[in-house]
Image: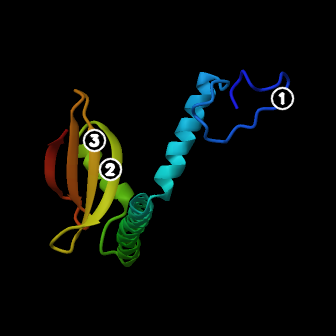
């Protein structure tokens, strides 16, 4: 029934995705068109498979990231636990003594300190120091002897 044949005041029944109805505002027509395309795309088998694959990849990436963080945290924690035990047993010097030795040999502000076990199975303190002239130095110190093993310019 066209507009000319319809009695005045009659209720017009519209289909939800009728994009040809002239009474629909252009914005509403665009909204309906987007909904139609979205509904169509989500029902396609390959789109569903693609969405499942994407969801699986995102889940795997999140799990891998979490596992990597846990493993890295465990390794660092293990090094600190071993260092604590070595200090108590007297095999290495406490950090305060090592820090005093480094400050007496290298002037600057200590930014960070880490303890690691190197390839030769010895404890090494790694200091990041900023010197008075603004250069960043990485200083490796033997935790047992307080001897400076290496000084590098760090960038």
8 left or right of 34 in image: right
Please state which of residues 83 and 96 is positioned toward the viewer in this rendering: 83
Give the residue drawn at x 65%, y 26%: 24
Q: Which of marks 2 and 1 is in front?
A: 1
141 left or right of 32 in image: left
Whether residues under marks 2 and 1 lie with C-beta atoms below 8 angstroms apart, the answer is no
Label ID, residue 129: 3
- For residue 86, above or below residue 63: below
Q: Residue furthest right?
A: 9
What separation in Å lies between label 2 and label 3 (alpha carbons)?
13 Å
| Mark sitting earlier along the chain (2/1) | 1
In x, y percent, where is residue 145?
A: 22, 64
Identify the residue position indicated by label 2 in the image. 100
- For residue 92, above or below residue 2: below
Identify the residue position indicated by label 1 in the image. 10
From the image, which quarter does the C terminus lie in?
A: top left
33 left or right of 84 in image: right
């Amino acid at each position: 029934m066209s507009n000319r044949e319809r009695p005045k005041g009659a209720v017009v029944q519209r289909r939800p995705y009728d994009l040809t109805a002239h009474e629909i505002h252009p914005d509403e027509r665009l909204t309906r068109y987007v909904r139609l395309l979205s509904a169509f795309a989500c029902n396609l088998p390959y789109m569903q498979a693609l969405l499942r694959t994407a969801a699986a990849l995102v889940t795997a990436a999140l799990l891998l990231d979490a596992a990597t963080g846990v493993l890295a945290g465990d390794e660092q924690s293990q090094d600190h636990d071993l260092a604590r035990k070595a200090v108590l047993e007297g095999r290495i010097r406490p950090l305060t003594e090592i820090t005093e030795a480094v400050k007496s040999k290298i002037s600057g502000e200590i930014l960070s300190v880490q303890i690691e076990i190197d390839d030769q199975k010895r404890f090494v303190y790694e200091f990041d120091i900023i010197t008075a002239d603004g250069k960043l130095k990485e200083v490796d110190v033997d935790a047992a002897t307080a001897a400076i093993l290496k000084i590098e310019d760090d960038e």
